[in-house]
Structures are given as C-alpha cells and as structure tokens.
Image (cartoon, rainbow, N blue to C red):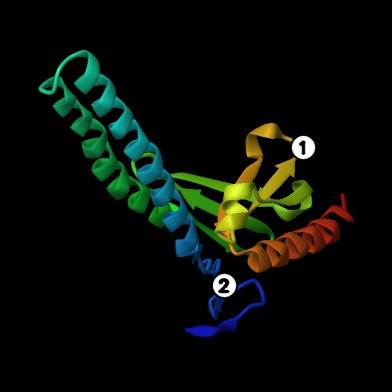
Amino acid sequence: METGSTETGSTETAEGTTPEPVWAGLPPGLLRMRRLLLVVWLGLLTAAVGVLLGVFAGPGWALFALLPLALAAWGWRMLGRNWRSWRYAERADDLLISRGVLWREETVVPYGRMQLVEVTSGPVERHFGLAGVQLHTAAAATDARIPGLDPAEAERLRDRLTELGEARSAGL
C-alpha cells in the first residue's frame, strides 16, 4: 500500500521498505542531434569514398561507397537503443544514473560526496537546445554525467543537487 509521493520523486510504502525510484529519461532532442550528426558525417564519407574510388579505381569500385550507408542504417538503430537506455532518478540520499544496452552501468552518487555540479553545453548542443550535467566527486571513479537535457531542467537539477550536496556534507 503506497502512502504517497516524496519530494524526491519516489514513493514510500507503508511497510517501510525502500521506495522505488522514479526514473526520468532523456529528451528526444538528444536523439535527433545524434542522428543528424550520424547522417551528415557518414553522408560526407559516402560521397568522398564514392568520388575517390570512381575516379581512381573505376566506377565498379565506387559501389564500395555504399558500405558507409549500411553503417549509417545500423548506427541509426543503435543510437535509438542507446538513447532509450539512459535514465536518472533523484532519491532521498543519492542520484542514480543508469545507461547501457549490452553492458548496463548504474552509477550511484551520494549527495554528500558531490564536490562540483556543472552544466555544460557545446555549440552543437546549444543549437539543438540541449545541455548536460556533469557531477564531480572526490573519487574520480564516481564522476558522472547526464547528457542531452533541456537547459532549464539541467539548471534545475544542478541547483537541486548543489543544495542537497551542501545539506548532506554539512554533517561530514
């Protein structure tokens, strides 16, 4: 029997068991950006290989330029699977980040161990209206990132994590 939702987005049970986290996925803008980059770069590679092979090796060899197109079709599907695998959840004492298709990786970052939370956005990300959150801890192995968020969500998450980090580290 559920008693309600906590401010961290997870639900508590009446029996006092550990609440299940409420996972949030990444916005579709990240997938659009990655797929566009895939098509642009592999399209340019296909054209360059086709022209070079056609000129220097003959028109029959230019058919090998279709290999990058096959790679683009495979990459299109893999990018979708990878995008769906990314998710994060805010819990009472830590942040969970899960990713990976074949090899699942789940990172748990305690709020009290966070030293720096920054929002980053490169030129391509800014063009697509995206930003990433980078978390730094004392142990380099537990540094984590969440890519491709809406800038408002990235700033909200940064502010919330910073606030929770300061509150949790006060007792250390």
Q: Position of residue 137 (x, y in %)?
A: 74, 41
In the rendered view, does 94 fall on the left or right side of 25? right
Q: Residue drawn 76% across and 47% down?
A: 113
State left or right for residue 26 relative to residue 43. right
* Mark 2 lies on residue: 10
> The residue tagged with tag 2: helix, strand or loop?
loop
Report the front residue among 34 and 58.
Answer: 58
Callout 2 crowding tier (Cα within 10 Å): few <14, some 14–19, many ≥20: some
Mark 1 or mark 2: whose residue is earlier in sequence: 2
x 69%, y 47%: residue: 135
Could you tell me which secondary element the residue under label 1 belongs to?
Answer: loop
Spatial separation of the CA atoms under disc 1 and disc 2 = 27 Å
x, y percent for residue 109: 65, 49
Crowd around label 1: few <14 · some 14–19 · many ≥20 (10 Å): few
Note whether 17 is above or below 106 in the view shown: below
Whether residue 96 appears in this view of the structure is no
Q: Which mark is residue 160?
A: none
Q: Residue at x 44, y 49 (%)?
A: 34
Could you tell me the amino acid type at mark 2? Ser
| 1 and 2 marks in contact (CB < 8 Å) | no
Q: Is residue 63 left or right of residue 164?
A: left
Residue identifier under label 1: 138
| Most foreground residue, 47 or 136 | 47
Where is residue 3 drawn, in percent x and y?
56, 85
